[in-house]
Image: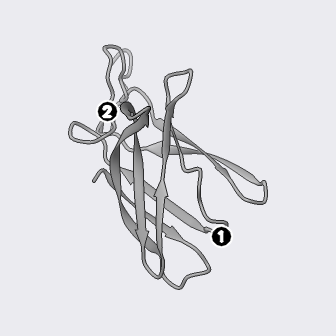
Amino acid sequence: IVGSASAVTPLLSRPLHGKVYFVQGIRFVHGHPIHTLPTLLVPLRGQIALDLTAETSVAGSGALVTTFPAIPDAPVSRFTLTISGGRKGVLVITGNHLDICRKQQFAHSALGAQNGKRRHQRIEVATPCGKTIAQRSGA
């Protein structure tokens, strides 16, 4: 379990809730297992049961891209996906010159509706850095 999720739709009187699972990526070619990038599984439960399965890829920039390609054609007024990070989390920062505390960190979200409308968001990502105090020169 690597996080939690919830979805609100005007079609139901209560939100759907569920845990987020990290699923090993394996596909078979001619009967032989091929390891691929892991994916996410989000089984939402409430008045209905809905299993969301993600596809994961790496963009040319090195950014991790997670896509939920099969979502029902239903209005969703709010979707919250929380993924645990840090030392024991599934999201970690690696590399010698990466400092996530220098500036705010953001994730980018692109949502596409069945009617063709699209929405892009820039979502601030929580970090373990705490507040930083700017140094004043001459002090």
Q: Earlier in the sequence, mark 2 or mark 1?
A: 1
Q: Which residue is mark 1?
A: 74
Q: Residues within 10 Å of mark 2 (few under 14, many from 20)?
A: few
Amino acid type at mark 2: Val
Looking at the image, the residue that sits furthest to the right is: 116
Amino acid type at mark 1: Ala
Tag in front: 2 or 1: 1
Q: Residue sitting at 77 percent across and 54 percent down? A: 117
Q: Secondary structure at mark 1?
A: loop
Asked whether 112 or 24 is in front, the reply is 24
Q: Is residue 137 rendered to the left or right of residue 113? A: left
Q: Which mark is residue 17?
A: none
In the rendered view, would you say 4 is above or below 32?
Answer: below
Residue 40 % position (x, y): 41, 48
Which quadrant of the rendered structure holds the N terminus? bottom left
In the rendered view, would you say 103 is above or below 1?
Answer: above
Q: Which residue is mark 2?
A: 92
In the rendered view, would you say 66 is above or below 118?
Answer: above
Q: Residue sitting at 41 percent across and 43 percent down? A: 39
Q: Residues within 10 Å of mark 1 (few under 14, many from 20)?
A: few
Q: Secondary structure at mark 2?
A: loop
Residue 112 % position (x, y): 69, 52
Asked whether 93 or 90 is in front, the reply is 90
Residue 123 % position (x, y): 52, 46
Asked whether 11 or 84 is in front, the reply is 11
Q: Residue sitting at 56 percent across and 21 percent down? A: 60
Which quadrant of the rendered structure holds the C terminus? top left
